[in-house]
Structure formats: structure tokens, C-alpha cells
Image: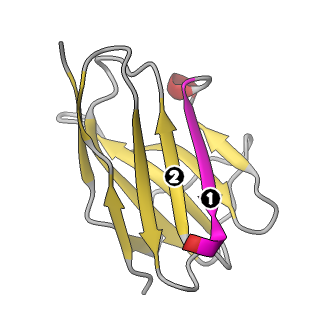
Amino acid sequence: QEHLVESGGGLVQPGGSLRLSCAASAFSLSYGAIGWFRQAPGKEREGVSCISNSDGSIYYAESVQGRFVISRDTAKNTVYLQMDNLKPEDPGVYSCAADPDSYCSDSDPPHPDFASWGQGTQVTVSS
């Protein structure tokens, strides 16, 4: 199973920015896909963004289009989620996940059963 560690969460005011990092094991970026998911109280886990390792195809949830950017640095075995213009509806526990067989793109959202998950990092948006 892949080892994933998230960091970068915290408290920001509306309109602020955060960059989340997902540090992965050596083989995590060599196959499948890596996605970012979030879960807020009273809501089910939501796929926020995802990047495919094969061709770099990217998925964004409609609610974060134009505000969040996912990227990867294979040399550092790290995937990032840059979050700009954060809104009060964005908070939750953000987790990264990797799967050896998944593919995601603008027309193929990530499924919720990725094989490996990080511990999650808390994002709070408040004035």
C-alpha cells in the first residue's frame, strides 16, 4: 500500500489561499491516479480534484473550478493542491489518495474507493 502524508491545512479567512501537499512513496506517481477528497460535517466524501499519472489529465469538481489547481512534482514524489479564493463552503478534512488502476479527467471523476489514503489535513475558512 502506498504511504501518503498530507500537509498545508490550516485556518484562512474567506478569499485567502492555502497550498496542500501530498508526499507519496517512491512508486505512487508512476501509475494510476492521485486525487484530493474532502469531507465536511454532515456531508459525504467529495472528490475535489484528481490527476492521472499516464497523461496528466485532470479533474476538478464544479464547485472549485477556476479556484483550485492540482499539480505534481515527480522528482519529489509530491502532488499539490493550490487553493485560492477559499469560500466558507470549502472547509473540511482534505485527504489525498492514490490508486494503481484509476484514471481521472474532466469527464471521468475519481471514484471514492482509491487503494491508499493519507491521514487528512484540516482546512478551516473563517473570518
Q: Is most of the magenta stretch helix, strand or loop?
A: strand
Lateral position of residue 62 relative to residue 8, left or right: right
Q: Which residues are magenta?
A: 67-75
- Name above or below for residue 88 compared with residue 52: above
- Is 71 contained in the magenta span? yes
Q: Residue 33: horizontal and vertical position, in percent?
A: 62, 65
- Mark number displayed over residue 80: 2
- Name above or below for residue 96 compared with residue 25: above
| Three-letter amino acid code at the position of disc 1 | Arg
| Three-letter amino acid code at the position of disc 2 | Tyr
Q: Residue 63: horizontal and vertical position, in percent?
A: 50, 24
Q: Residue 120: horizontal and vertical position, in percent?
A: 27, 57
Label 1 residue SS: strand
User: Which residue is rendered at x = 56% and y = 63% of the image?
Assistant: 34
Q: Give the position of the C terminus as an image quadrant.
A: top left
- Mark number displayed over residue 72: 1
User: Which residue is rendered at x = 36% and y = 21% of the image?
Assistant: 16
Label 2 residue SS: strand
Q: Residues within 10 Å of mark 1 (few under 14, many from 20)?
A: some
Q: Give the position of the N terminus as an image quadrant.
A: bottom left
Lateral position of residue 54 relative to residue 8, left or right: right
User: Which residue is rendered at x = 62% and y = 63% of the image?
Assistant: 73
Res 113 visible:
no
Q: Residue 71: horizontal and vertical position, in percent?
A: 62, 51
Work out how far the residue at label 2 is from the one at label 1, CA to CA, in angstroms.
6 Å
User: Which residue is rendered at x = 35% and y = 55% of the image?
Assistant: 95
| Contact flag, marks 2 and 1 (Cβ < 8 Å) | yes
Quarter of the rendering containing residue 68: top right
Res 97 visible:
yes
Quarter of the rendering containing residue 46: top left
